[in-house]
Amino acid sequence: MRRNLLIVVLVLVVAAFGYWYRENNLKTLDVTYFYANGAVDGIQSLVIKKYGLDTKNHLNITFKHGSPGELERQLLAREADIAQTSPMIASKANLDGKALRLLSPQIHMSYNILVPAASPIKTLADLKGKKVAVAPKVTAAYTAFALVLRSADINPEIDLNLIFGSIPDAVKHLQNGEVEAATVSYPLAATLVESGKFRVLTRLEDEWIANEGVSLPFVVMVAYADWLEDPINRKIAKRLAATLHDAATLIAERPDVVTEESNTELNDYLTQNNLSKDTVKAILREKTAKDLYTSWGNDEVSAIERVIKRAKEYGLLPPNAPEDIIIKPSDL
């Protein structure tokens, strides 16, 4: 009798442990995550859903997208607790009472400077005195552009003739010959390069790496500090980072997944963005992986720290903008 009672107790303990383990480690958690229109993570999100990478990490991600300005507004208005933004925007937001914490890097500085194929411009220094189409001055894209040029001893506001506007505006200015160079990111740059009428002068992150020795995290995952106090939310953040990095790794190992015919939603996306030509798809297979971070470790943390430090030195951030807002993966 006593032996039977012990067996029953043992079974109950095992069942309770199994329930606890499933609830804490295997239960699928829901999260909504926003990305910017025209950004490379639009492709990444469709690869995630095609291959169920969120499900494999015990997440159910609802992806939504909007303009960069709208996403920033939503984040700062706290219409989202976890989102993506520039490290510089997040640091400055803390000065305004927004306790944002920087998590995993997502997108490298993905902007390239394009010039007409026959342009005499050969180096970054050759841009001095030239008309250059760039993102609006209030955007993260412009601030990152300015950061790279300042690192290369070029002050864009003094040395360049800047024309501000959206990426589509920049493309039109370049196509119409109204500017001599423009900052454009992939995937949208693929169509211009494929036409043969334009060429990449430089990938801005390559210039940064040459001068700084670290990568340039352009977009990072961020979350509000009090939201991260909940252990469940910390799990969501950790699993979300793992899912995004799994997708980036898959794209790096199998570039064909960014254009495969069996991914109906992805093909619709490519068609809507004029990226469906075979020659354009070939460029996407070559370039997409380079813009996505596949890991989150000490090197990436150091890279984020460098961005904030240099931005303060160059006056792109206030001197008191915080640097100690980065959460390491081991602390999540």
Image (cartoon, helix red, strand yellow):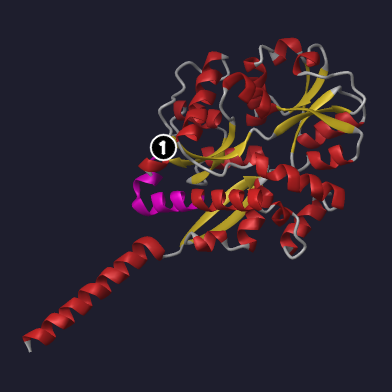
Q: Quadrant of residue 314?
A: top right
Residue depicted at x 78% and y 59%: 268
Residue 309 or residue 91, whichever sits in front: 309
Left-right relation of 25 to 212? left
Query: Residue 275 lies in magenta, yes or no?
Result: no
- The residue most toward the left is 2
Residue depicted at x 44% and y 49%: 238
Residue 233 picture location, percent across and down: 40, 51
Left-right relation of 81 to 261? left
Residue 95 picture location, percent across and down: 45, 25
Mark 1 belongs to which amino acid? Ile
Residue 79 or residue 40, whichever sits in front: 40
Residue 258 vertical position relative to residue 55 in the rendered view, above or below: above
Residue 272 or residue 99, whichever sits in front: 272
Residue depicted at x 78% and y 53%: 270
Residue 138 picture location, percent across and down: 65, 26
Can see residue 277? Answer: no
Residue depicted at x 62% and y 61%: 49
Query: Residue 228 lies in magenta, yes or no?
Result: yes
Residue 102 picture location, percent across and down: 47, 36
Q: Which residue is mark 1?
A: 327
* Number of numbered labels in the structure image: 1
| Viewport quadrant of the C terminus | top left
Callout 1 secondary element: loop
Left-right relation of 69 to 159? left
- The residue most toward the front is 253
Residue 53 vertical position relative to residue 329 in the rendered view, above or below: below
Circle 1 residues within 10 Å: few <14, some 14–19, many ≥20: some
Q: Considering the whole magenta stretch, tell me its main secondary structure.
A: helix
Please report the bounds of the magenta region as a residue range: 225-240
| Viewport quadrant of the N terminus | bottom left
Can see residue 289? Answer: yes
